[in-house]
Amino acid sequence: MIKLIAIDLDGTLLNAQKEVSQANRQALAYAKSKGVKVVLCTGRPYFAMKHFLADLGLVDPEDYIVTFNGGMVQKAQDGQVLVSNTLGTSDVLAWYQVTQDLDLPINVIDADRLYEPTAYPVGYPSLYLENVTNVPSVVQDYKTFDPDHAFNKFVIVTTQEHLDAQIPKLDPDFKDQYAVFKSRSFFLEVMKKGVSKGDTLAKLGELLDISPQEMMTMGDQENDLSMIELAGLGVAMGNATEQVKEAAQYVSLTNEENGVAHAIHKFIV
């Protein structure tokens, strides 16, 4: 019996216009009416998600959200943190130096805002803010962060062509000290090593006394693999990467065809 549904946003719940279709809205409400917990699992911070949660009616006292690609589990109603995995200022400085050498723009994000460096590599500004809305940002010299400042993730957002050309140049030993993955074709994300949507979703399950076998997870990209592999029922969108489709137990319709609604009505009765 499915007790929890975990759903990715971009390429899964959202269509190309970054909207939740009426069919998907109704399916989420249907699942909740059946007593199934609906948990959004996103790379976005809580402060960029509050409007989504309210709009979808996912702000009851016992509603939860996984943010920062597994960096946090928070109560959807007020953002209270239940699980947290963070990086430090030393990590920021190390990644800033590496990305400067590779002409890659890097932003760092904590629980409150996104930070922009005083200068991006010439010709390669960050594309993050034009792709993710409702994110407060500030410019800061990364060398001035307090030594004990906690960060949830780093993002490198540039053109896919440039990103794909530079990723292989990252030192493997350095890269292996972190969780590094693409969440979209032109988004590279850096997290604390061992952090993933799947790992953090398992921790939420422990808090709620819900086993992975009682979960259905839905996604489309590399950063969704861990939760697709974790769940008793992993669902890939029809537009998912081949790797995600191969790991899933079921391949639904695409995000443009209400794939989330299709899977919910197929498996939640």
Image (cartoon, grey):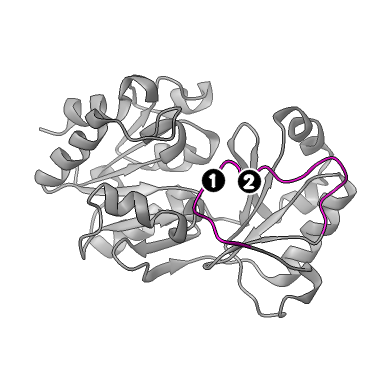
Residue 126 magenta-drawn?
yes
Say which quadrant the N terminus sits in.
top left
Q: Mark 2 points at which residue?
A: 128
Residue 141 magenta-drawn?
no
Q: At numbered mark 2, what does the secondary structure look like: helix, strand or loop?
A: loop
Relative image position of residue 169 (x, y in whole percent): 84, 39
Q: At numbered mark 1, what does the secondary structure look like: helix, strand or loop?
A: loop
Q: Nearer the viewer, residue 209 or 38?
A: 38
Tag 1 and tag 2, C-beta contact below 8 Å: yes
Relative image position of residue 137 (x, y in whole percent): 61, 61
Q: What residue type is labelled 2?
A: Tyr
Q: Nearer the viewer, residue 242 or 39?
A: 39
Q: Mainly helix, strand or loop, the magenta region?
A: loop
Say which quadrant the C terminus sits in.
top left
Tell me if mark 1 has few (under 14), some (14-19) or many (20+) residues whose alpha carbon lies within 10 angstroms of its own: few
- The structure residue drawn at horizontal position 78% and vertical position 53%, both measured from the top left corner, is 174
- The structure residue drawn at horizontal position 15% and vertical position 34%, both measured from the top left corner, is 268
Relative image position of residue 21 (x, y in whole percent): 29, 30
Distance (Cα) linking label 1 and label 2: 6 Å
Q: Mark 1 points at which residue?
A: 132
Q: Can residue 249 be seen in this view?
A: yes
- The structure residue drawn at horizontal position 88% and vertical position 45%, both measured from the top left corner, is 122
* Image quarter of residue 219: top left
State the extent of the magenta-drawn residues as a range: 119-137
Residue 29 falls left or right of residue 43: left
Residue 73 falls left or right of residue 35: right
In this rendering, the answer to whether 79 lies above or below 196 is: below
Tell me if mark 2 has few (under 14), some (14-19) or many (20+) residues whose alpha carbon lies within 10 angstroms of its own: some
